[in-house]
Image: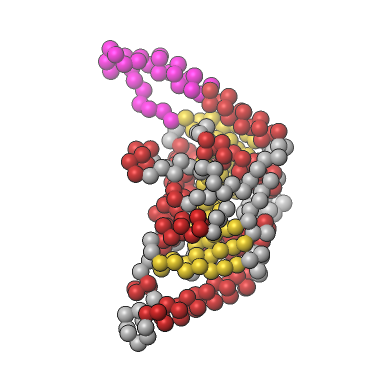
């Protein structure tokens, strides 16, 4: 069951961010959710035209700027048709990623919808990466860095997934069997039920350089390494099958897939070569040294995937439950 009540969408009025807003509005309309739109001024004195002229007080310029931008946003929504039950526009000042995450927490957003890249620094890829790490709810990254023809096609979407009967609807669910991946599986199954989509459950088994007996007496031999990875592969197959069986219990067709390689590279390769409608991926939300060591597969996928990516972490503001 999908119980989506509040959506937050950051915009900077660029074409990519407005395309994400159009999708956020359509999703809000489908699920009867309210839509909050946040516009962040990183440096108001520089971002607002006339901010340094002295012709008006800065407070007056700020009020005029907000009024103009709010009207622009609401006009856009009216033109696209008002799907959302309730719409509000919020203005914040500061670091974009920080203000977006703070706003999501303050309004208890169920989901953040934002473009994965944008023409303005506010919504560049690094901001999206940081929002994925900091936001207290799932983040839907909308890939808008397409050719003009693809953007026009995407702009016609009035849903999270293209609901055209002729459209191929497969949800890619990468999993590393962590708690976050388990939560992502609930989301993938729920959306598959909603859109009558299949799920491709993918586990990418990483391989380190093979050791051989020639590398030192105390290191495992080649045969030991092969046996070790063979056991890992069989265990991964078993756990992927368990996820597929769970999907089947909810009348969702799921396909098993266990391959070896670099997770981010393999996930992106599949997304680019196959008709994937949506990627649902768990993220650890690591920060600092831990993130440097482990990196973030979810962030790399969200930034470079050719389709929308829903990044899910920790159990806050979950808006899906499986019956």
Magenta residue check for 53: no
Residue 241 visible at all: yes
Q: Is residue 243 above or below residue 121?
A: above
* Residue 262 found in image quarter: top left
Q: Is residue 47 above or below residue 10?
A: below
* Residue 154 found in image quarter: bottom right
Residue 110 point in image, percent of width and height = 57, 53
Q: Quadrant of the C terminus?
A: top right
Report the number of numbered marks: 0
Magenta residue check for 218: yes
Residue 279 point in image, percent of width and height = 55, 45
Residue 213 as seen in the image, left or right of residue 304: left
> 73 or 143: which is nearer to us?
73
Residue 253 point in image, percent of width and height = 68, 36
Write the start and end of the magenta stretch as one range. Answer: 206-234
What colour scheme has been applied to the protein in the rendered image?
Answer: secondary structure
């Amino acid at each position: 069951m999908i119980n989506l009540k509040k959506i937050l969408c950051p915009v900077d009025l660029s074409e990519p961010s407005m395309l994400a807003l159009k999708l956020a509005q359509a999703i809000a309309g489908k699920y009867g959710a309210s839509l909050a739109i946040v516009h962040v001024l990183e440096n108001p004195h520089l971002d607002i035209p006339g901010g340094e002229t002295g012709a008006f007080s800065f407070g007056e310029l700020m009020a005029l700027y907000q009024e103009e931008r709010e009207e622009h946003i609401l006009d856009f929504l009216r033109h696209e048709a008002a799907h959302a039950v309730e719409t509000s526009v919020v203005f914040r000042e500061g670091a974009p990623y920080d203000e977006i995450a703070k706003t999501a927490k303050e309004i208890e957003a169920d989901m953040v919808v934002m473009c994965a890249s944008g023409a303005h620094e506010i919504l560049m890829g690094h901001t999206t990466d940081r929002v994925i790490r900091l936001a207290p709810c799932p983040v839907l990254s909308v890939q808008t860095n397409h050719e003009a023809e693809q953007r026009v096609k995407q702009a016609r979407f009035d849903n999270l997934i293209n609901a055209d009967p002729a459209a191929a609807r497969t949800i890619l669910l990468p999993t590393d069997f962590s708690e976050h991946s388990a939560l992502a599986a609930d989301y993938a199954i729920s959306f598959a039920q909603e859109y009558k989509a299949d799920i491709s459950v993918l586990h990418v088994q990483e391989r380190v350089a093979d050791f051989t007996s020639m590398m030192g007496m105390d290191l495992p031999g080649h045969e030991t390494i092969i046996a070790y990875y063979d056991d890992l592969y069989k265990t991964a197959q078993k756990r992927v099958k368990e996820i597929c069986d769970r999907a089947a219990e909810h009348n969702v067709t799921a396909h098993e897939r266990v391959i070896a390689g670099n997770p981010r590279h393999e996930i992106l390769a599949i997304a680019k070569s196959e008709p994937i409608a949506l990627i649902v991926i768990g993220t650890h939300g690591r920060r600092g040294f831990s993130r440097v060591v482990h990196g973030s597969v979810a962030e790399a996928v969200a930034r470079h995937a050719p389709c929308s990516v829903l990044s899910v972490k920790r159990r806050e503001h979950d808006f899906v439950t499986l019956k």
